[in-house]
Image (spheres, rainbow, N blue to C red):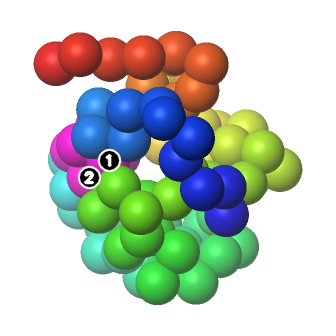
Amino acid sequence: MVEPRGGNTSGFARRLRELRTQLGWSREDLATRVDVSANSVWNWENGKHFPHIHKRDKLCEVLGTNPEAICLPPFECDW
């Protein structure tokens, strides 16, 4: 996991939760697909951490999105 460094995790956290719930997945479902723990997904959705760079591509792939749309750094979302 990557500690936020002054970046805005709230846009990412909100968008991640939105996409996961739209797919009808639990945190455990998403965690299995990305090969992380459910606790990691919880941390992402609660703005504690960003996913490690090696997991970002997989996360975007399973959610059918891209880093910009999900507000991953270096992209910022103010909504």
Kind of residue indicated by mark 2: Arg
> Nearest the camera: 74 or 21?
74
Q: Residue at 43% across / 26% down in the picture?
A: 71
Q: Which numbered disc covers residue 13?
A: 1
Badge 2: few (under 14), some or many (20 or more) residues near its Cα, within 10 Å? Answer: some
Tag 2–tag 1 contact (CB < 8 Å): yes
Of all residues shown, which one is farthest toward the right?
54
Question: Is residue 52 highlighted in magenta?
Answer: no
Q: Which residue type does callout 1 highlight? A: Ala
Q: Residue 42, image x and y in percent?
A: 37, 73
x, y (%) of residue 41? 45, 69
Q: Residue at x 32, y 47 (%)?
A: 13
| Location of the N terminus (image quadrant) | bottom right
Check the image and report above or below for 37 versus 73.
below
Q: At numbered mark 1, what does the secondary structure look like: helix, strand or loop? A: helix
Q: Residue under label 2, please give it.
A: 17
- Residue 62 appearing in the image: no
Magenta range? 13-19
Q: Position of residue 74 (x, y in %)?
A: 61, 19
Q: Is residue 16 above or below residue 44?
A: above
The residue positioned 30% from the left and 75% from the top of the image is: 26
Q: What is the spatial separation of the Cα atoms under label 2 and label 1, in whole angstroms? A: 6 Å
- Residue 27 visible in the shown view: yes
Residue 43, given in percent of the width and then of the height, sits at: 42, 70
Q: Is residue 15 magenta?
A: yes
Which residue is at the far front? 6
Residue 12 position by quadrant: top left
Does dot 2 land on a helix, a strand or a loop?
A: helix
Q: Is residue 38 above or below residue 34?
A: below
Q: Nearer the viewer, mark 2 or mark 1?
A: 1
